[in-house]
Amino acid sequence: MIITMKRGASPEETQRLINSIESQGLEMHLISGTSLNVFGVVGDTTILDEKKIYGFSGVQEVTRIAAPYKLANRIFHPEDTVVEVGGLKIGGHEKIVVIAGPCSVEEEDSLLASAAAVKRAGADMLRGGAYKPRTSPYAFQGRGADGLHTLCNAREQFDMSIVTELMSIEKLDEFLEFGVDMIQIGARSMQNFDLLKAVGRTQTPILLKRGLSNTIEEWLMAAEYIMSEGNENVVLCERGIRTFEKYTRNTLDLSVIPIVKEHSHLPIIIDPSHGTGHRQLVEAMSLAAVAAGADGLIIEAHHDPEAAWSDGAQTVAPEQLQQIIAKGKAIAHVIGRQM
Ligand code: PEP
Ligand code: MN
């Protein structure tokens, strides 16, 4: 809850309000106080009655903030956050980034071929899972440390930063040793609070995917977990949510872009691959995401999609990626951005 005092409110009026709020077990924090005092009320504000607060003389406005997040909240941080990943800037008015690569890190030759192809198509960063969260324990689980090694070789060869998923705390040191440029927290881990806290204690940029069935508020609270441990380098990623619809793998919720931008200062990128599950839908959703104000795209792309070890159906070929980027640039231009 935010309480704004009138410009001419006296110190006595302000103190009476503070006494009343604090006597109820809450804290009043002055968050700006040059010409008028603005207080943030910390604690369980559900017990407060706004009308009663308006009854105190000197009070100008009481705003109930349903949102329980603070560090991720735009109210306390009006300017856009720009997250830097190996020299690449994500967010604000920076260039719209394109992250592309296969779903999983495959054998070295294959990953290098995909990396070369996405680089040629115009991607800024390389993606690929070395540890894969699969629905079936019998499905390919990823190449693990060998996969990270391969990914790092591709990074070096093609001069592209890498993003890859961390599934458990026990592998965090390994990720740090490899110098993974951006750690992805997958949809299934969005509420693994210990994992969020652990990556929050690093300074590595985090790509935080929205959970399959999570609300925007829960997602921003997950970001809050990371940030409250000291790591403010968080980029949000919408990757579709689970609905009753069967034509798509998930329902890609593009309305989150303006909503997140209103409520948070964190950058947001879109994953049209997991968001739809079908490669023929990826272009349209990518362009819509750019038009809606996304700060980037993360697209599953492979030099030979039919041979992809996982998520082939939603994986685009290099020519498609190139076309998406070409059209995306045109749309970005219309909305005053670059891609
Ligand atoms: C992925 O990016 O390959 C992935 C598994 O994503 P998500 O967590 O969104 O399903
Ligand atoms: Mn995938």
Image (spheres, rainbow, N blue to C red):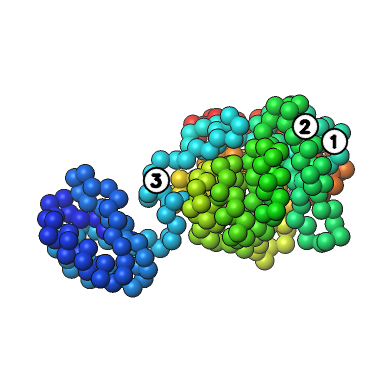
Q: How much space separates mark 3 and mark 1, taking CA atoms?
A: 43 Å
Which residue is painted at 58% across and 31% down in the image?
88
The picture places residue 128, in percent across and down from the top left corner, at 74, 42
**What element does badge 1 sit on?**
helix
**What element does badge 2 sit on?**
helix
The picture places residue 308, in percent across and down from the top left corner, at 84, 44
Residue for badge 1: 108
The amino acid marked with disc number 3 is: His
Which residue is painted at 62% across and 63% down in the image?
213
Say if mark 1 contacts mark 2, CB within 8 Å: yes
The amino acid marked with disc number 1 is: Glu
Which residue is painted at 67% across and 33% down in the image?
161
The amino acid marked with disc number 2 is: Asn
**Residue 49 falls left or right of residue 317:** left
Could you say which disc has been placed on residue 153 in the image? 2
Q: Nearer the viewer, mark 3 or mark 2?
A: 2
**What element does badge 3 sit on?**
loop
Q: How much space separates mark 1 and mark 2, taking CA atoms?
A: 9 Å
Confirm or reject: label 2 Cβ below 8 Å from ligand 1. no
The picture places residue 46, in percent across and down from the top left corner, at 36, 71
Residue for badge 3: 77
The picture places residue 147, in percent across and down from the top left corner, at 80, 42
Q: Is residue 298 visible?
A: no
**Residue 162 falls left or right of residue 268:** right
